[in-house]
Image (cartoon, helix red, strand yellow):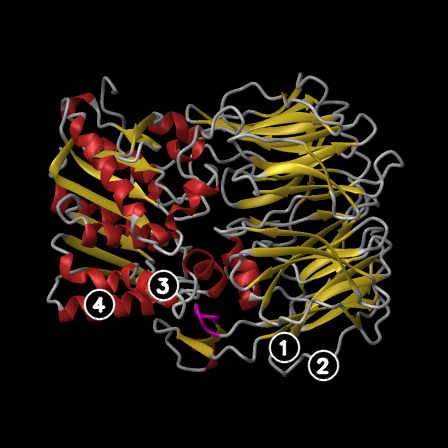
Amino acid sequence: MSDQRAPAIPFEEVARYPLPGWIAPSSIAFSPDDSVITYLFSPNADLTLQLYRYDPATGESALMAEASGAGVTEENLSLEEKLRRERARELGQGISRYAWAKKADRLLIPLPDGLYLQDGVDAPLRRVLDTSTAPAIDPQLSPDGRWIAYVQDDELYVISAEGGAPRQITHGARGTGRTHGLAEFVAQEEMHRSHGFWWSPDGEWLAFVEVDETPIPYFRILHQGKASTGPDAQEEHRYPFAGEANARVRLGIVSREGGAPMWMDLGDDEDIYLARVQWLPDGTLTAQIQNREQTILDLVCFDPQTGQRTPLLREQSDIWINLHDILWPLITPAWEDHFVWASERRGFRHLYLYNRNGEIIRALTGGDWMVDALVGVDEERGAVYFTASLDTPLESHLYAVPLSGGEPRRLTHTAGMHAVVMDHRCRRFVDTVSALDRPPTVTLHRVDDGALLDVIFDRPDPRLAQFDLQPPELVSLSSPEGITLYGLLFRPPAEFGPGPYPTLISVYGGPGPQMISNSWGPTSSLRAQSLSRQGFLVFALDNRGSARRGLAFEGAIKHRMGSVEVEDQATGVRWLIDQGLADPERVGIYGWSYGGYMSLMCLACAPQIFKVAVAGAPVTHWEGYDTHYTERYMGTPQSNPAGYAAGSVLTHVEGMTGKLMLVHGLIDENVHFRHTARLINSLIAARKPYDLLLFPDERHLPRSLADRVFMEEEIYNFLSMHLASPK
């Protein structure tokens, strides 16, 4: 508990991005020859990024490229790019993306007015293609850096890196409801597959997805806040609702010069998900194909000349298949015809060595912990490098394990969450690490023993001293079933006494993210910091269903969303009450997206505990959300009607007795405002009062600073009115 009250945090600062401490370099990459390290960075500690380089030989960092004009802004992007940024949760401006060619000293920087190339770290930017009037979507360099492919008006194009006229290499999609080379909505939003085409290793061919969305009806969104009523005041999206039609996909290969595509054999079942596509170094194409139920995943190979498929392996689960990006082909003579693959077959994601016949050679890792990412394989030394939760689910560290089998060896030693980028030869790695008491720093290390070579970034954010941020306390408690649950506690300053306090639960609660960890993220939450300084006890808990605890912990919500999550959040509040910290008559909850859903379900299903709720962009009925996400956890409305009914907020409205604020953006194309509108109808029918805060020009995540400031102020006033009178 603080000895004195920390300074108040203005709403303008609570709403500002990036949050305090999050000013470290991002998008870190080694150049193809490993001579320099590149990254995006904002020298002004705001959202406007530029491209920098760090030279390991000299220890010097320098500006490498800055955007022409303003670069990327929220105002100068096409609708398609805005939607892609929304699905990627991308906020960066200026230079927001860049990519090295895999085998050439050349990098690509896409900006609103054109595609730019830089031929080495010291060369100037040069524009290859003017995109100011016709946006080039998802541009990608060929491995040799000689060509750029991109999508325009639903078709795939290629242009030489030396400039000249682009060549359209796919045909027949434009104006038909189909697209060539673009990832469909659920691939971007739920499968974390942002690409719809892939260069072959030799740069001669492109694999691409044909997406046919015509089976999906349009869902119209009106821009109610616009002055005009013309075409720009409405959008139409083909949104695949749970239990309804999905997009149909085909996987083709086309020459860089164009021509008739060769279509790959994806199997007899058309109702599948094309989850991943990857070329192997020998020119074989692979794909990961999920069934609609997401209980089976097939890894298959294709002959690019005939499209014929050869199965490599099959994953099956009684819970569901979590997608990952761990398929690492080995290429040296000692290991050729082998690959490293990740599987949750034993309940936790682990690494396995396979041969090209699809046979397991050995498990490389195992135990009641999970691999987060595979960051490098040194075939010469026979070592595999990965990040994992081996020591604690509250941290992630870098480890090495022999390809021939053996025990993992830890290479990072600073407490916290580590994100690692390794050079191509597995000799050095860049480590971005943070902890509850430390904002992110970026350092360079030797792979052999993890020894520190240099500090790339360790600059204090001025806002840290300005607001005197104190890290929350990590706590653990047991559920009635004996399951360990982890939480974070923000205590009020000493002047508010020992408690009990008016209490606010900050919740997400859904599958996918891990919210409780020894990382800087919770400490940088200025809403939680601000509320605690006003006398609220703020608490967050990872309930069953959240990530990095294994399939059994995560799968507890299968076919029953809104059940065990509410039970665990209620258990957390009871624990706070037993500690003398929470006033049982003054407990509120707030959250966004799944957290908004959780806020509503807690208010409705545990009204004896939760007295106040703020629900932002909430799902209120699961048949109104998309196929890939919802059906993974709930099945379909047709196969699990009881689960859908029990998991719907609309079913439980009669149980609400507390105070409620609903917050939603009217042009949210992910969780449609329809969710809140249907809930309002149920609230009116049950004569339940509510407060409503709408943002006519916002999507799922509010991007306007003015809107966010107003939102924070209104949420604070609502919570203060109904839970406490701050000092």
Q: Main secondary structure of the magenta part?
A: loop
Mark 1, Cα crowd under 10 Å, few <14 / some 14-19 / many 20+, is some
506 drawn magenta: no
Q: Which sits earlier in the primary sequence, circle 2 or circle 3?
A: 2
Residue at 87% x, 54% y: name it. 202
Please provide percent x and percent y for residue 178: 63, 77
Q: Which sits earlier in the primary sequence, circle 4 or circle 1?
A: 1
The answer to whether mark 2 and mark 4 are in CB contact below 8 A is no
Q: Nearer the viewer, residue 286 or 599?
A: 286
**Spatial CA span between label 3 and label 1:** 27 Å
**Spatial CA span between label 4 and label 3:** 16 Å
User: For mark 2, what is the residue?
Assistant: 172
The answer to whether mark 1 and mark 2 are in CB contact below 8 A is yes
Q: Is residue 237 above or below residue 628?
A: below
Residue 679 sits in which quadrant? bottom left
If the image is split into quadrants, where does the C terminus sit?
top left
What residue range appears in magenta? 239-244
On residue 62, which mark appears?
Answer: none
User: For mark 3, what is the residue?
Assistant: 622
Residue at 67% x, 63% y: name it. 196
Please provide percent x and percent y for residue 425: 79, 31
On residue 680, which mark appears?
Answer: 4
- Front position among marks 2 and 3: 3
Q: Is residue 583 above or below residue 579?
A: below
Secondary element type, mark 1? strand
Secondary element type, mark 4? helix
User: For mark 1, what is the residue?
Assistant: 178
- Three-letter code, disc 2: Gly
**Spatial CA span between label 1 and label 2:** 8 Å
Viewer can see residue 168: no
